Image: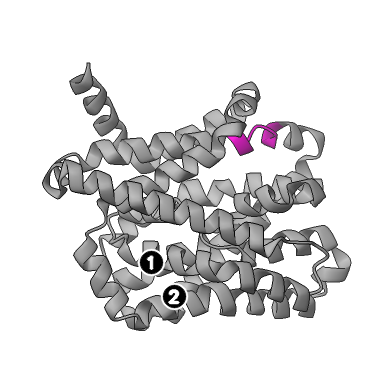
C-alpha cells in the first residue's frame, strides 16, 4: 500500500505544474467541496511549509544567512519597494478615488508577505528554494510592522492587529521549521532526495486544499457579471506577471536563476493571510480578487519551468 501511495504521489509530482492547473479547475467546478475544505486551509499552508523546510539543506541555509546581502535585497524589494511603488502608481492613476475597492485589493496584495507555498513552487520549477524560504521568514518577521505602517500612509481604511498577526506568523514559521528539520534529521537527506518527486506530489495535494477552498465562487461571479469578473481577472494577471517581470529585471544582478527565484517570491503574495486577519471587514471585491488571483499563481509554474532551463 505504501509503495503504491509513493508511486502515485511521484506520478503527480512529475506533473506538478500541469496538476496545479487541473486542481484550479476542480476548485472552480466543485463549490461544495470548497466549503468542506475551507476550515483546513491553515493546516494545508502549515504542511507546505513543513515540506519546504524538510527539503532545505541546513548548510546552504546557514550560508545564505551568513551572507545576507541577497536576502536583504529580496526583503527590501518585496516588503518596502513594491508596496510603496504600488501606492505611488495607483494614486497617480487615481485608482484610489475611481475604484476604491480595487485600490484596497491591490494595496493589500502589495503589503502582504509572499505565499508560504512559494518555496515549494520555486523548487517545483527547478530552482533553489533556500532564498525563497529565507525571504518568507524575513517577510514574516517584518510584516506585522511594515504592513500597518504602509497601509496607514496609503490611507487604506482597514484595521490590522499587528500583535496577533506577529504571534500567528511566528508560531507558524517556528513550528513548521522545527517539524520540517526534525523530519529531515530522522528520515535523512539522502532518502528525501530520492523521494523528491513524491514530495512534489504532496505539495500539489496541499495546494489543492487552498485552491478548492477559495475558488468556489469564481463561476457564479462570471455568470452574474461576466465583464466585471473578466476585467478583474485581467487586473490580477497584470499585477502578478508585471510584478514578476519587473522584479526579475531589478534583481537581475544577483544572477538569472537567483533573480527568478526572488521574482517568484515577490510576485506570489499571500492574500489569503489578509483574508484570515480582516476578512469580515473586507468587501466582496477583495474576496473575488483573491480567488481570481489564483489563476496566474497556479499557471505560472507551467511557464516558469521552461524559462528556468534557459537561465544561468
Secondary structure beneath dot 2 equals: helix
Question: In the figure, is residue 283 to the left or right of 143?
Answer: right
Q: Position of residue 149 (x, y in %)?
A: 70, 75
- Please identify the residue farthest to the left as the structure is shown: 190
Q: Position of residue 17 (x, y in %)?
A: 38, 43
Q: Residue at x 77, y 64 (%)?
A: 103
The residue identified by callout 1 is 134
Q: Which mark is residue 3?
A: none
Q: Position of residue 11 (x, y in %)?
A: 26, 31
Asked if 268 appears above or below 138 in the picture, the reply is: above
Q: Which mark is residue 74?
A: 2
Q: Quadrant of the N terminus?
A: top left
Asked if 254 appears above or below 220 in the picture, the reply is: below
- Please identify the residue farthest to the right as the structure is shown: 97
Asked if 161 appears above or below 8 in the picture, the reply is: below
Q: Residue at x 25, y 44 (%)?
A: 183
Q: Residue at x 22, y 67 (%)?
A: 60
Image quadrant assignment for residue 304: bottom left
Residue 203 makes an appearance in the image = yes
Amino acid at each position: 500500500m505504501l509503495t503504491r501511495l509513493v508511486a502515485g504521489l511521484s506520478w503527480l509530482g512529475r506533473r506538478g505544474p500541469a496538476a496545479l492547473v487541473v486542481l484550479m479547475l476542480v476548485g472552480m467546478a466543485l463549490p461544495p467541496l470548497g466549503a468542506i475544505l475551507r476550515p483546513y486551509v491553515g493546516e494545508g499552508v502549515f504542511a507546505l511549509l513543513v515540506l519546504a523546510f524538510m527539503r532545505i539543506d541546513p548548510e546552504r541555509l546557514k550560508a545564505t544567512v551568513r551572507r545576507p546581502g541577497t536576502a536583504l535585497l529580496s526583503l527590501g524589494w518585496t516588503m518596502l519597494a513594491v508596496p510603496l511603488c504600488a501606492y505611488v502608481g495607483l494614486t497617480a492613476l487615481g485608482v484610489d478615488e475611481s475604484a476604491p475597492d480595487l485600490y484596497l485589493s491591490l494595496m493589500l496584495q502589495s503589503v502582504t508577505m509572499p505565499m508560504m507555498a512559494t518555496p515549494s513552487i520555486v523548487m517545483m520549477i527547478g530552482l533553489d528554494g533556500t532564498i525563497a524560504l529565507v525571504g518568507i521568514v524575513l517577510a514574516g518577521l517584518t510584516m506585522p510592522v511594515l504592513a500597518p505602517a504602509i497601509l496607514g500612509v496609503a490611507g487604506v481604511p482597514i484595521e490590522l492587529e499587528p500583535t496577533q498577526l506577529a504571534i500567528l506568523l511566528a508560531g507558524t514559521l517556528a513550528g513548521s521549521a522545527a517539524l520540517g528539520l526534525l523530519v529531515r534529521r530522522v528520515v535523512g537527506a539522502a532518502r528525501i532526495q530520492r523521494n523528491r518527486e513524491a514530495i512534489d506530489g504532496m505539495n500539489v495535494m496541499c495546494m489543492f486544499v487552498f485552491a478548492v477552498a477559495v475558488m468556489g465562487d469564481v463561476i457564479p461571479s462570471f455568470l452574474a457579471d461576466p465583464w466585471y469578473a473578466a476585467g478583474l481577472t485581467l487586473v490580477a494577471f497584470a499585477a502578478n506577471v508585471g510584478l514578476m517581470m519587473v522584479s526579475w529585471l531589478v534583481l537581475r544582478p544577483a544572477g538569472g536563476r537567483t533573480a527568478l527565484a526572488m521574482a517568484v517570491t515577490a510576485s506570489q503574495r499571500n492574500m489569503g493571510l489578509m483574508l484570515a486577519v480582516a476578512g469580515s471587514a473586507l468587501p466582496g471585491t477583495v474576496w473575488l480578487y483573491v480567488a481570481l488571483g489564483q489563476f496566474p499563481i497556479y499557471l505560472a509554474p507551467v511557464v516558469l519551468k521552461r524559462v528556468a532551463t534557459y537561465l544561468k
